[in-house]
Image (tube, helix red, strand yellow):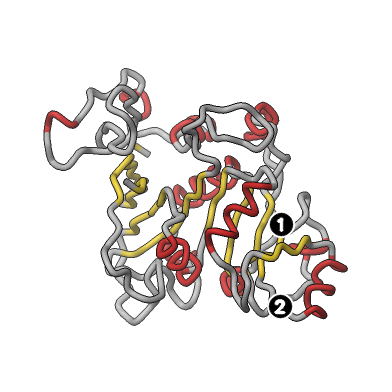
Amino acid sequence: MRRLFPVTDQTAPAAAPAPGAQSEGRSEGRSEAPAHVADLVDREWTLDELAEAYAYPAPLATPGTPAASDAPHRWLRANMVSTLDGAAQHDGRSQAISSDADMRIFGTLRGLADVVIAGAETVRLEGYRPARARDAFAARRAADGQAPAPAIAVVSASLNLDFSLPLFTSPLVPTLVLTGTAASPDRVRDAEQAGARVIVAGDGPGVEPDRAVAALADMGLVRQLTEGGPRLLGQFAAAGVLDELCLTVAPLLTVGSAQRITGGPVLPDPERFALAAVLEEAGFLFTRYRRI
């Protein structure tokens, strides 16, 4: 894996450059590559190096701890993969358009997160299991006061989920279920009896994105990661709560009519994101964008 080019973070103050992305085609916007970048060219990065590259902004205003008054109270990033022609999946799953390096970044992003948020359909299609503790991230997580593994938070209006699966019955950290007030009391009870914690984050049948991320942050889960699917990511983007997009661009064409990485109504005005970093391996581009 190699860094394509150094960048300055366009979303941060000019006095606080961050590694990673290029400016709007202006040479004066670029920074010189750090001395260690050359050492990372054409060799596999360690998980610790990937963790540094994808670290969440600091400080985050974790509830109950002092932090700068202007520090964000939570940070929601998305991790998605897309082909060159915009497909977010092939035959209904994302694995077919992924790569070994993409899966290492996938694992790194999970290793940094407090909570992984996923839509019910994605949980069913991708066969979600509980997140596991990994030795490579143990010291980092302990130093940040995190649980050994991230919690999985499933967004579901209907609660049409199989609560006998290990995701609900045997996670290292209790699985969360986000739903609305119209959810069936019987299904809520089934979820709770299976060991899940149900969080109401909407006044109707569905979940309101701003309430969902706020409820998780109030629980101390401020390093938030969503892995979609497209409909859930579209809802987060439309609600203006998505702070960062980690997008893998796969050097593949699938044709067909597969979903894009987001789904839902068109935004009245496109929302602008700034490029923060790009890595490359075997033709796969691993990009990171931050909301301006």
Q: Which quadrant holds residue 166?
A: bottom right
Q: Secondary structure at mark 1?
A: loop
Q: Is residue 54 above or below residue 122?
A: above
Residue at image point 44% right, 62% down: 239
Q: Is residue 65 above or below residue 206?
A: above
Figure disc tally: 2
Q: Position of residue 19 (x, y in %)?
A: 34, 30
Name the amino acid type tagged 2: Ala
In this figure, which residue is indicated by the disc labeled 2?
183
Residue at image point 69% right, 61% down: 129
In this figure, which residue is indicated by the disc labeled 1?
130
Name of the residue lying farthest toward the top: 35
Residue at image point 78% right, 78% down: 187
Q: Position of residue 164 (x, y in %)?
A: 81, 72
Q: Earlier in the sequence, mark 2 or mark 1?
A: 1
Q: Secondary structure at mark 2?
A: loop
Q: Is residue 215 left or right of residue 236?
A: right
Tag shown at residue 276:
none
Name the amino acid type tagged 1: Pro
Mark in the foreground, 2 or 1 = 2
Residue 168 in view here: yes
Q: Position of residue 152 (x, y in %)?
A: 67, 56
Mark 2–mark 1 distance (CA, rounded to whole Å):
23 Å
Q: Is residue 103 left or right of residue 156?
A: left
